[in-house]
Image (spheres, rainbow, N blue to C red):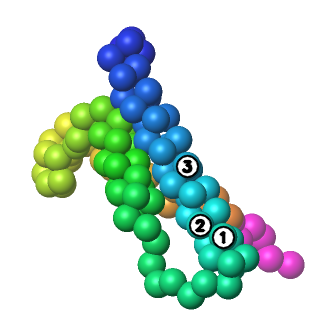
């Protein structure tokens, strides 16, 4: 699989991330201005809110283009692809440190 089809998605993701970080910086600057001017104002200006929403949308579209194909949610579809040897082999449940070792030792 080549990386060329994912290039527009990566670029959009970076642009969206840049827009989001710029809106965060604008928010910080706006709040520090309000604190320095001793103004009491509720909420943020509409341009910062719109910039944040546009950044989120651009980032989501870019991330969707980069991600691979979706897998089906039904378990039957995934289990049909498995062989019985893969399904039955569970090495995480094997225990090698158990009491059975003492069954065949001679007691004194």
Disc 1 residue crowd, few under 14, some 14–19, many 20+, Cα 10 Å: few
Quarter where residue 29 is shown: bottom right
Q: Quadrant of residue 12?
A: top left
Q: How many marks?
A: 3
Tell me, yes or no, whether the two marked residues, 1 and 2, touch with CB atoms within 8 Å.
yes
Q: Residues in magenta? A: 99-108
Residue 81, x across and y down, in percent: 20, 37
Looking at the image, which residue is at 51% across and 55% down? 23
Q: Main secondary structure of the magenta part?
A: helix
Residue designated by label 1: 33
Q: Is residue 75 above or below residue 65?
A: below
- Does the rendering let one see residue 38? yes
Find disc 3 in the rendering and name its residue: 22
Foreground disc of the pair 1, 3? 1
Q: Is residue 50 magenta?
A: no
Q: Quadrant of the N terminus?
A: top left
Mark 1 lies on a secondary structure that is helix
Residue 15 or 8: which is nearer the viewer? 15
- Name the residue rendered at 43%, 28% in the picture: 10
Foreground: disc 2 or disc 3: 2
Is residue 56 shown to the viewer in this render?
no
């Amino acid at each position: 699989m080549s990386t060329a089809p994912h290039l527009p998605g990566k670029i959009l993701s970076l642009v969206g991330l840049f827009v989001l970080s710029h809106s965060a910086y604008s928010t910080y600057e706006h709040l520090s201005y309000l604190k320095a001017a001793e103004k009491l104002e509720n909420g943020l200006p509409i341009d910062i809110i719109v910039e944040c929403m546009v950044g989120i949308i651009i980032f989501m579209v870019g991330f969707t283009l980069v991600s691979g194909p979706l897998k089906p949610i039904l378990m039957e579809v995934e289990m049909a692809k498995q062989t019985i040897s893969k399904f039955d082999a569970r090495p995480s449940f094997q225990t090698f440190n158990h009491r059975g070792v003492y069954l065949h030792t001679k007691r004194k």
